[in-house]
Amino acid sequence: MDQSKEQRILNSVSYNAIKGDPESVLACIDKYCSQNEWAMNVGDEKGLILDKIVKEADPTVALELGTYCGYSAVRIARLLKPNARLFSIEFNAEFVPIAKEIIEIAGLQDKVTILEGHAQDIIPRLKTQYNMDTLDFVFLDHWKDRYAPDTILLEECGLLRKGSILLADNIIFPGAPDFLKHVRNNIHYECTHYPSHLEYMKAPDAMEKAVYLG
Ligand SMILES: Oc1cc(-c2ccc(F)cc2)cc2cncnc12
Ligand SMILES: [Mg+2]
């Protein structure tokens, strides 16, 4: 059977990246996806915004919704302090083993736990099953119509604390209007908009930071 695009991305990383070097893994994926096959990684331009917010948050416990091939998991985990951890939720079973291998090639497997399933099923179990208190940073990059309900679920499950930082990808394209409606003009959130472009393309896109105020 023909290989999937995601398998071809893994092949490229496995062949070209330097083992244990996250920067070379990111550069390899960005090169492949800008020159060979477009893929929905957050990419190098929006990745710089992600880097900035992760450094600002300096999280001990981070959550990512939407692992895909593990590009943003590598991007986030490479910035984590020694005892910090990233949990990444992915529902597509085909993507999970590919992301795991890419994260391993980057040498970040001890910092990242991939949880396979739907965010709405996993979020309610994070405290009990993973001994979690609250989340310091959340990257939303899964299906856009799930950003708002999953944010509300994080609130209801007591996983957000005063100062928890949410960062959402694709605010313009494909767009997440319900999420913006929930966090903007909401006394519980302080929002910042970061205009950018769709990964590897000229089309406008943006990220939204929403700091939970408790
Ligand atoms: O960054 C992203 C981009 C796109 C996407 C798809 C098709 C298109 F034409 C434009 C953009 C889809 C995504 C789904 N999940 C997470 N991130 C995504
Ligand atoms: Mg995205």
Image: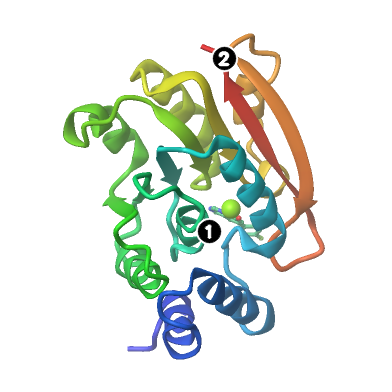
**Residue, disc 1:** 75
Residue 185 against residue 103 in the figure, above or below: above
Residue 105 against residue 165 in the figure, above or below: below
User: Label 1: few (<14), some or many (≥20) within 10 Å?
Assistant: many
- Which picture quadrant has residue 198? bottom right
Q: Are marks 2 and 1 in contact (CB under 8 Å)?
A: no
Quadrant observed for ligand 1 in the rendered image: bottom right
Alpha carbons under labels 2 and 1: distance apart: 26 Å
Quadrant location of the N terminus in the rendered image: bottom left
Q: Which residue corresponds to the image point at 53% horizontal and 47% vertical from the top-left?
A: 141
Q: Which of these two is toward me, 63 or 21?
A: 21
Disc 2 beta carbon < 8 A from ligand 2? no
Residue 99 in picture, x, y percent from top left = 38, 66
Q: Which residue corresponds to the image point at 29% horizontal and 58% vertical from the top-left?
A: 110
- Which picture quadrant has residue 193? top right
Most extreme residue toward the left is: 129
Please report whichever mark, 2 or 1, sits nearer to the chain's N-terminal start.
1
**Residue, disc 2:** 213
Q: Which of these two is toward me, 111 or 89?
A: 111
2 lies left or right of 124:
right
Residue 209 in picture, x, y percent from top left = 65, 33
SS for callout 1:
helix
Q: Which amino acid type corresponds to the residue marked 2 in the rendered image?
A: Leu
Residue 131 in picture, x, y percent from top left = 21, 31
Q: Which amino acid type corresponds to the residue marked 1 in the rendered image?
A: Arg
Q: Which of these two is toward me, 88 or 118?
A: 88
User: Label 2: few (<14), some or many (≥20) within 10 Å?
Assistant: some
Would residue 93 be seen by someone viewing this image from the given angle?
yes
176 lies left or right of 140:
right
SS for callout 2:
loop
Q: Which residue corresponds to the image point at 47% horizontal and 38% vertical from the top-left?
A: 59
